[in-house]
Amino acid sequence: MESGSRLPLSDGNPLFSSRQWQRRIALWTGAIVVALVAMLFARGTDWTYSLFTRLLAHSRYWPLLITPLGFALLAWLTSGALRATRGSGIPQVIAAVAREDDAPFRERLLSLPVALGKLALTLFAMLVGASVGREGPSVHVGAGLMAWFARRSGFRDSASVSRFALAGGAAGIAAAFNAPLAGVMFAIEELAGAFEHRFSGALLTTVMIGGVVSLGLVGDYAYFGKMTTALPLGAAWLAVPVMGIAGGLAGGAFSRAILYTTDSTARLVGPLRRGLTPIGFAAVCGLILALLGLASHGTVYGTGYAQAREIIAGHHTIGALYGLDKWLANVVSYAAGIPGGIFSPALAVGAGLGANLAPLLPHTSATAVILLGMSAYLAGVTQAPLTSAVISMELTDNPNFVLPIMASCLIARTCSTLLCKTPVYRALAERLLRERESELKPRQ
């Protein structure tokens, strides 16, 4: 092995190296654990949100009290040692991997208490009706568990811990969506930015093991059900650029909005945050969400999964303004600084957007327009077109829709950059990195 190798694990053939096999076994075992935790997390979010819906069924006015108080309590709980549990969790993983040589910083973002706290506090956010998802937190929890597993297995060097965290994050999203290919693509496009060839096989195997565990326990299912919608060449393809542009602009506007509302130096929001304190600001965000809930007859709470399925199925119980209402609910929930992701809520907004624009595209089936809206909006939010396309295809198990979805995601990504130059997860990760640099400056 050359002396410049980043990870000299053995002097002999790495295929038979005991150290290499120790790493593989640790990764595979960790992948099983992450998949099991992700599935328990999914069941937990369903259960906690069902408790909130029972409360909502008792009286639609309960959220006016419960949601602001819950948001305030979450802001207080995350003001100290659990500060790293705020938000999606994906920016924390990106920042930790980016500064792999800064062990204290990585430990702060990916410690076992943070991973467990993220899980518990996201469940509590669901309990009080927050418009958040579990997929981003699953990435954070998976990365934290695998980083802890790496250290417990004897891989304490910075490079190994970062690689384990990367694999754990990818396995987390693969298990959350039951979409292994999406997990691999997510690790390449979002978490790592660049892909290291030496680790590609280990990462791929880890994610696939997580997917197999998920498949074995919950069965071969598509997140939104198996669909056979196709887009024949011709006038129907007009939906691709239309939804790509609309989804990209709406997604870019969302990213710009949450970056602005979470910026303590912003001209309007900054003084409001400082005047109200983080706890008071979170309570105000919770009150706004509750008022949106009243206006929308309770459809904006939670992940939006049920509403998206109803829209795809062509049911008309969802209001015409659902897409806009859910967009606003997602913004105020993320602005509050509470734990929770944006993947599932983004798919719900995209479904609402597609339903709004479907009547303008009479040559395309409404279901096709809705699916394009979901994938394009997700690509607009994340600016990760390949991940968005693969997730959308795996969630509907529809190989006939590969080219339209891919084209709409690429268009959406381009349009999104007109409103938000930096991908939202990267921008939030860069904030964490700048905060760390500010901490270290006085010591230098």
Image: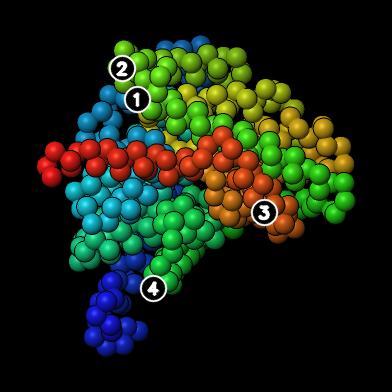
The reply to whether discs 2 and 1 touch (Cβ–Cβ < 8 Å) is: yes
Q: Is residue 392 left or right of residue 366?
A: left
- Viewer can see residue 226: no
Kind of residue at badge 3:
Met
The mark closer to the camera, 3 or 1, is: 1
* Circle 4 residue: 198
Q: Secondary structure at mark 1?
A: loop
Q: Secondary structure at mark 3?
A: helix
Between discs 2 and 4, the one toward the N terminus: 4
Between discs 4 and 1, the one toward the N terminus: 4
Between discs 3 and 2, the one toward the N terminus: 2
Labelled disc at residue 274? 2
Kind of residue at badge 1:
Ser
Between discs 4 and 3, the one toward the N terminus: 4
Q: Is residue 117 left or right of residue 178?
A: left
Rounded to the nearest whole Å, what is the CA distance between mark 4 and mark 3? 28 Å
Kind of residue at badge 2:
Arg
Labelled disc at residue 264? 1
Q: Residue at x 23, y 57 (%)?
A: 101
Q: Residue at x 33, y 53 (%)?
A: 98
Q: Residue at x 88, y 51 (%)?
A: 234
Q: Is residue 183 left or right of residue 29?
A: right
Q: Position of residue 10 (x, y in %)?
A: 24, 82
Residue at the outermost left position? 443
* Circle 3 residue: 406
Rounded to the nearest whole Å, what is the CA distance between mark 4 and mark 1? 40 Å
Q: Nearer the viewer, residue 421 or 144?
A: 421
